[in-house]
Amino acid sequence: MIDVLRATVRTVPDFPTPGIQFRDITPILAKPELVRFAVKALVEPYRKVGVTKVLAVEARGFILGPMLAEALDAGFIPVRKSGKLPYTTIRETYALEYGNDTIEMHIDAVGDDDVVLIHDDLIATGGTAAATFRLAVFGGASVAGFAFLVELDALEGRLLLEEGVPVHSLVHF
Ligand code: AMP
């Protein structure tokens, strides 16, 4: 099934800028059996570690993020691009595979009692996930791990993440 998942990711060359091989997950989203499988497989290592919140990053992290949260009986916390969240936020700036960005989370979104799982559709350089980790820790939470549908191995993004925190990716390119 992992092979089917991998084969269903569509690679679009030179999007959004020349030289980037964009790994498009929308063909997976169009197949309910693949979405069901992906959600189950993503939460599997984190079922018994007491996850209370799933933090996911705008925009593609918002697709499976709430489904992972529901599967773990946890809350969903949106981490958004700068200026989108209405209440007081904490923020982090980071480098992307293409460009720079700032992400924000509501200041009261997580607290000392929270155990969080961080999710995004894909890890490239790891900058987004590392910034999300810093937001979670700043909020007082402990981080159970990371869950990605796709990991771009050559970019070694996982090396940017906190040592010793589990990183679980379903499909590797
Ligand atoms: P990074 O911070 O470099 O790990 O980038 C991860 C974020 O950028 C994720 O939200 C991805 O959706 C997006 N992204 C980066 N590179 C790609 C790529 N080659 N294909 C699809 N999405 C990408």
Image (cartoon, grey):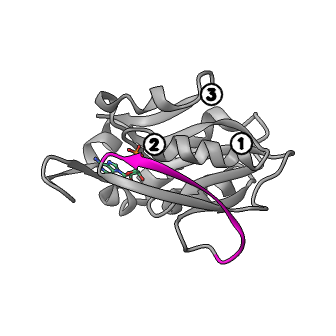
Tag 2 residue = 127
The percent position of residue 8, horizontal first and vertical second, equals 28, 48
Q: Assess mark 1: CB under 8 A from ligand 1?
A: no
Q: Earlier in the sequence, mark 1 or mark 3?
A: 1
The stretch in magenta equals 86-97
**Disc number for residue 165:** 3
The percent position of residue 80, horizontal first and vertical second, equals 55, 64
Residue that appears at 57% across and 38% down: 146
The percent position of residue 96, horizontal first and vertical second, equals 37, 48
Task: Say few, some or many: other residues with alpha carbon within 10 Å of mark 3 (under 14 / 14 to 19 / 20 or more).
Answer: few
Tell me, yes or no, whether the highlighted magenta stretch contains residue 160: no
Tag 1 residue = 137
Residue that appears at 55% across and 74% down: 84
Helix, strand or loop status at disc 2? helix
Q: Earlier in the sequence, mark 2 or mark 3?
A: 2
Residue that appears at 46% across and 35% down: 169
Q: Is residue 147 visible?
A: yes
Q: Assess mark 2: CB under 8 A from ligand 1?
A: yes
